[in-house]
Image: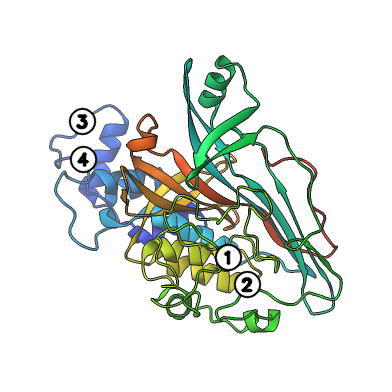
Amino acid sequence: MDELQMVREAYGEPTPPTLREMTDARAAMFGKPPRTRVRFGWRLKAGVGVVAVGAATAVAIAAVGSGSPAPPGSPAEVDLDKKAVLAAAEKAEGQPTGKYWYSDSFDGQSYVIRAKTGTYAITAASSESFNWTGAKSGMGEAYYNRDLPARPATARDEALWRKAGSPSTFRVRGDGRYITYTTRAPKWRSSGPEVGTNPDGGGQFVGPGPGPATLEDLQKLPTDPAKLAKLFLSPGQGDPSGGNPSGADPSGRNPSGADPSGRNPSGADPSGAGLSGADPSGRRGAGPANSYAQIWRTASVLGGPIPPKVRAGLMRALAAQPGLRAIGRATDPMGRTGVALATDDRAETSYRARDVIIFDQRTGALLSVQHELTKPGGEYAEMKPGFVINYKLDRSSGWTNTKPKPPAELPF
């Protein structure tokens, strides 16, 4: 869907101009003002037809209007930001398939460092997981993880970190105890109880039920947004056992379930489903009963190889949920910009925050789910609104016809 088509659907075709309007337009073009003028120029839609300046003018005129509140259902009430999310969903319909599904994701937690030379923030407790799974059983599967180095969160934080002497270790308080993170980057691990390879595996993915789903199961999912909302986003959906398999911290400060020991920091699902879908709302076992849980549940499903039309339908279903609103463009911790949906903010001890999900507008791919500060306070009193408290980011995922390997380069 291109921009012109989006605007046509939102605003309809322009009304043909009247003879008087065409006369006024010609006079204005040649510097001769008409003898009489309609307040705020020509009729709203007619002006677009006369000067033929394209879709952007139609949006601008509709947004300005006459200064009066727009009646319900009028073009001025159309949420073009949400339309951008729907356009991204349409792009998701055209993504290719292959023999092996892979997912490369990482998470992070922000900490505030109060140095004598100036307060700055770092991203730590960060790990990356890389997984691939064959489309069918017997095609194999592999999963790897590595800790990521602690680093300043933004360019401004980096400048303040350098001013503080560029320390290579950071001692911070987390999970009720002090933890030290370093700027060292360990290598990928592919052995141990949480990570490894299984040449006989494959063909098992995250589905709507309590157990794994086959690719055939996923192919049978509905594409209708209403049906997908009932299947994945209604109260009680998610973990039917009533437990909390993701290991999420119910405080909401570490939704990825990251283990600071580095033993299994990502909480990665070895099926290759990518984002864990952990709910930071703290409602253990409740499933997507609120917008926070709906975002994380959607991220979990989109992290797997669901068919393109199902993917698009679920994105549309999420965009239609009453507890979510479009916020236009947003940037993830890798600096990638996309279109985003956000929950309302809520109180978190001494500050307020919200959850944001970001999609690539060009491809419809999931970019990130992040917990953002909306009202500073407490440990984040010196941070500004928009500060990312923690996140789970999809570096890349998709189908390939050859067995993929984890990237050697760091994601930042």
Residue 394 is situated, as x and y percent measured from the top left of the image, at: 62, 53
The residue drawn where x is 67% and y is 74% is 205
**SS at mark 3 in the image:** loop
- Disc 4/disc 1 C-alpha distance (Å): 47 Å
The residue drawn where x is 49% and y is 80% is 240
Label 4 or label 3, whichever lies nearer to me, is: 4
**SS at mark 1 in the image:** helix
Amino acid beneath label 3: Pro
Q: Which residue is mark 4?
A: 41
Q: Which residue is mark 3?
A: 33
The residue drawn where x is 51% and y is 71% is 313
Q: Is residue 80 above or below residue 270?
A: above
Disc nearer the start of the sequence (4/1): 4
Residue 357 is situated, as x and y percent measured from the top left of the image, at: 48, 54
In screen coordinates, is 105 left or right of 66?
Answer: right
Residues 88 and 110: in front is: 110
Amino acid beneath label 2: Ile
Amino acid beneath label 4: Gly
Q: Residues within 10 Å of mark 4 (few under 14, many from 20)?
A: few
Labelled pair 4, 1 in contact (Cβ < 8 Å): no
Q: Is residue 267 above or below residue 137?
A: above
Q: Which mark is residue 306?
A: 2
Residue 253 is situated, as x and y percent measured from the top left of the image, at: 45, 49
- Disc 4/disc 2 C-alpha distance (Å): 50 Å
Residues 38 and 295: in front is: 295
Disc nearer the start of the sequence (4/2): 4
Labelled pair 3, 1 in contact (Cβ < 8 Å): no
- Disc 3/disc 1 C-alpha distance (Å): 57 Å
Amino acid beneath label 1: Leu
